[in-house]
Amino acid sequence: MNEIINLSNPIVEAQPLFGASLQELTGLMENLGQPPYRARQLYEALYAQRTPSLDQITTLPATLRTTLSSAGYTVGLPELLQTARSIDGTERYLVRMADGETVETVWMPGGDGGERGDGTQAAEEEEHPTHDDDDYKRATICISSQVGCAVNCQFCLTAKLGIRRNLTPGEIAGQVAAVLNRHKVEVGRDRINLVFMGMGEPFLNYAAFMDAVRLLTGPMSIPESRMTVSTSGILPGIQQFASETIRPKLAVSLNASNDVVRESIMPITRKWNIAALLEAISAVPLRPRERVTFEYVLLGGINDQRQHADELIALLKNLRAKSQAKINLIVWNSGPDMPFHEPTPQDVGIFQKRLRDGGIPAFIRKPRGRDIYAACGQLKRTLESPPPTPLVEIAL
Ligand code: SAH
Ligand code: SF4
């Protein structure tokens, strides 16, 4: 989008407009000798109306649309290539970007187990349990931020892909637009939560992730209070996040109650240990009634014992005292060739009760779309594709 168009160039590369800021569109219109209000019209069409193709943007004159497309511009929304539908209504999409790379995005419709954009599942009451309008939709969309992931958590299927590349702001917000279009969602009437919990580590693609958030909260009108970002604990990202004025809620994948266990399942602990992580989290200024969610994937025999619950209670003591923490327990979703096993339902219940007795709000996240591999950690490409790049060390 930064390039000045060259109308005389016969070989034009497709240039997606979706993802451009108002400023960038204004620059583009200026180059074309158009008044600034044309940029505003294009901006509205892209993000508020989510118009999927240039020729459907009828607020722009036909000649201008032709000029744009002959210069190679397209709306460029990611394409929903393949859909898998779960018996629980969850839909998983294989989403193709302009260069052919694919990620996965998940639509979780209806009651989302009490989710309020924060990934909680809960005994917490829904604010509007009923709605008069039959067409009214409620759903959570789970978005990817990278093609693959570099963090290498041992229990996660996405990790096995390695990292292929970062997604752009347009590709991140575009997943939302494509899925909203598929379900004919009217933002404002319908209630949509977003969770940045798909493929990738959002805080290792920080600038693009935050640019996407600005598009989603701005012209796409999805409130920041309905968004949650989950990080494996990238410290510089958390520190930067703390200074954002508009930001999603924060969830952190803790997954262990001490550094030894965490390091064995999340090697990133060697870079930033639990104490450093908690310190950085404590520095994030919370809004009224906001709490940080700690995600905790329960791995049978590894982190699901009584001693671990007790360590967790002690760890979160300070945050707990200020009512700033809650825990989402996630039963591990199995994958092939992984040296873990699911905890027993009995152990899960005991673990939750022990945390609650210790004063920590703890919820068990309801697995969604397990039968189609759409549940947590199961987002892994399933179509034929070039072999994944080897796992890479995280360079920061
Ligand atoms: N990269 C980010 C966000 C995506 S992962 C992060 O790690 O936080 C979203 C959540 O799924 C994380 O809490 C992660 O710990 C969890 N997860 C990963 N693999 C899982 C699996 N196989 N079963 C259950 N949860 C898993
Ligand atoms: Fe990456 Fe999150 Fe999976 Fe870890 S759990 S490998 S950070 S996607």
Image (cartoon, helix red, strand yellow):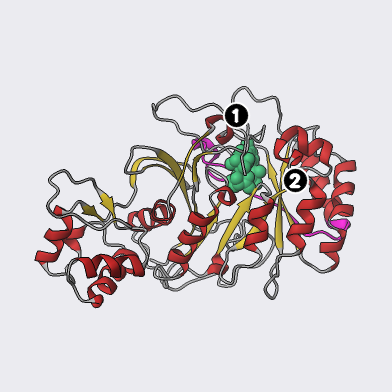
Q: Compare marks 2 and 1 and give the one earlier in the sequence.
A: 2
Residue 40 shown in magenta: no
Residue pictured at 50% horizontal, 48% vertical: 145
- Per the image, the residue denoted by label 2 is 272
Q: Quadrant of the N terminus?
A: bottom left
| Mark 1: amino acid | Gly
Q: Is residue 304 left or right of residue 380?
A: right
* Residue range highlighted in magenta: 356-376
Label 1 beta carbon within 8 A of ligand 1: yes
| Residue matched to label 1 | 335
Dot 2 falls on a residue whose secondary structure is loop
Instruction: Tell me the number on the disc at residue 39.
Output: none
Q: Answer yes or no: is residue 367 visible.
A: no
Q: Residue at x 48, y 42 (%)?
A: 87
Q: Quadrant of residue 66?
A: bottom left
Q: Residues within 10 Å of mark 2 (few under 14, many from 20)?
A: some
Closest to the observer, 206 or 263:
206
Judge the density around disc 1: few (<14), some (14-19), many (≥20) Cα neighbours within 10 Å. some
Of the two numbered discs 2 and 1 in the rendering, the one whose residue sits closer to the viewer: 2
| Above or below for 357 versus 321 | above
Residue 61, x across and y down, in percent:
12, 69
Give the left or right position of residue 216, taking residue 287 as reference: left
